[in-house]
């Protein structure tokens, strides 16, 4: 039977590219230095770690959808970036520069239909990269996962999110500072919310009691601002897998494992969401202290390797 797909209800629906989407940010080789410079400038001006812009002061944005996304295929996995096959689910997280964050998820050995990078949890409809980097839209650089829950559990993706950065950093990761690099875990249903909150409490204890600064919010909370998720420019999608990509990553993994699922998961969710990736996977392929994912293979991790 043909695969039935639907568009996510949280994606923007307009189709024309905005007149500012074809901007001067289309040179990917300049981005690592550019993003560090922008972050430093914002710090000097009080915008780096100072907090969030208010909705009434955010840039106005536009109704036109990002150019070049419709019909775009995942550079590694080959699937359409926008589609959500019947029975599949979505997850969205943010943990610093979205290049390395996205790669850590598409490399998971099974169940990942697509990953994409974009701008989420902000106030400006259809922002551009330059606008998001200004901290004037309220968005953070995020990654979206479309996955098959029959093959990989939400908690496997959630664990990779926690372990792949330092969630105790406020408004940034490493050299990347500003609200556009803040840590965030966003839910599409009550189960995801409960799993995020329970794992957050457990990981905070594992980190020695350091306060986790991760934003936890529902995707539906942003409908009043025009939408929750907006795809980033096509050149950002799976950037680290493309020829000539600079191996840049700002995330700061702590080398600390999330405690066992059974120790923190709500009892009524343990059967439905039990992990599918064994501890042998995490022992061999889990994040280590410092950001190393940029140096790893672009292909999904073989199940035979653990």
Image: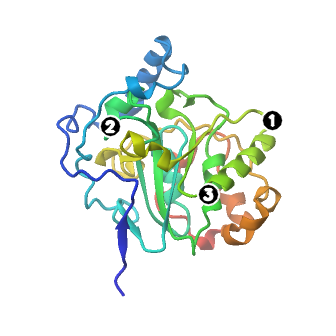
Residue 168 lies, in percent from the top left, at 67, 33
What residue is at 31 percent from the left and 36 percent from the top?
Answer: 128
Tell me the number on the disc at residue 190. 3
Residues 263 and 76: in front is 263
Q: Secondary structure at mark 1?
A: loop
Q: Secondary structure at mark 2?
A: loop
Assess whether mark 1 and mark 3 are in contact (beta carbons under 8 angstroms).
no
Q: Which mark is first along the chain, 3 or 2?
A: 2
161 up-or-down from 2: above or below = above
Q: Is residue 180 left or right of residue 31?
A: right
What residue would you read off at disc 2? 127
Q: CA distance from mark 3 to mark 1?
A: 26 Å
Residue 235 lies, in percent from the top left, at 30, 46
Q: Which quarter of the figure is the C terminus placed in?
A: bottom right
Q: Is residue 123 left or right of residue 221?
A: left
144 up-or-down from 232: above or below = below
Residues 238 and 148: in front is 148
Residue 236 lies, in percent from the top left, at 35, 45
User: Farthest front residue?
Assistant: 224
What residue is at 26 percent from the left and 46 percent from the top?
Answer: 66
What residue is at 68 percent from the left and 55 percent from the top?
Answer: 195
Q: Check disc 1: other Cα within 10 Å, few if <14, some if 14-19, many if 20+.
A: few
What residue would you read off at disc 1? 209
**Can you see residue 219?**
yes
**Can you see residue 33?**
no
Residue 206: image quadrant is top right
Q: Which quarter of the figure is the N terminus placed in?
A: bottom left
Residue 142 lies, in percent from the top left, at 47, 44
Q: Check disc 3: other Cα within 10 Å, few if <14, some if 14-19, many if 20+.
A: few
Residue 271: image quadrant is bottom right
Front position among marks 2 and 1: 2
Q: Which mark is first along the chain, 1 or 2?
A: 2
């Amino acid at each position: 039977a043909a695969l039935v797909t639907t568009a996510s209800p949280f994606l923007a629906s307009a189709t024309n590219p905005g007149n500012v989407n074809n901007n001067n940010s289309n040179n990917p080789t300049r981005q690592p230095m550019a993003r560090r410079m922008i972050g430093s400038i914002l710090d000097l001006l009080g915008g780096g770690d100072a907090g969030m812009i208010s909705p009434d002061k955010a840039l106005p944005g536009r109704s036109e959808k990002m150019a070049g996304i419709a019909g775009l295929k995942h550079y590694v996995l080959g699937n359409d970036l926008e589609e959500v096959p019947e029975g599949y689910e979505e997850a969205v997280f943010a943990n610093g520069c979205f290049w390395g964050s996205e790669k850590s998820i598409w490399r998971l050995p099974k169940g990942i239909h697509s990953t994409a990078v974009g701008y989420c949890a902000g106030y400006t409809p259809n922002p551009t990269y330059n606008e998001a980097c200004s901290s004037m839209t309220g968005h953070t650089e995020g990654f979206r996962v479309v996955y098959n829950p029959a093959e990989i559990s939400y908690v496997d993706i959630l664990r990779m999110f926690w372990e792949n950065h330092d969630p105790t950093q406020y408004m940034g990761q490493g050299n990347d500072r500003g609200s556009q690099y803040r840590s965030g875990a966003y839910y599409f249903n009550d189960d995801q919310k409960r799993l995020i909150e329970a794992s957050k409490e457990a990981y905070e204890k594992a980190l020695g009691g350091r306060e986790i600064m991760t934003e936890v919010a529902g995707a539906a909370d942003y409908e009043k601002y025009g939408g929750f998720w907006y795809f980033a420019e096509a050149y950002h999608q799976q950037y680290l897998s493309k020829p000539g990509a600079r191996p840049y990553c700002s995330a700061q993994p702590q080398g600390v494992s999330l405690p066992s699922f059974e120790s923190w998961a709500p009892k009524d969710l343990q059967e439905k969401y039990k992990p599918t990736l064994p501890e042998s996977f995490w022992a061999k392929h889990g994040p280590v202290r410092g950001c190393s994912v940029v140096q790893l293979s672009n292909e999904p991790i073989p199940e035979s390797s653990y």
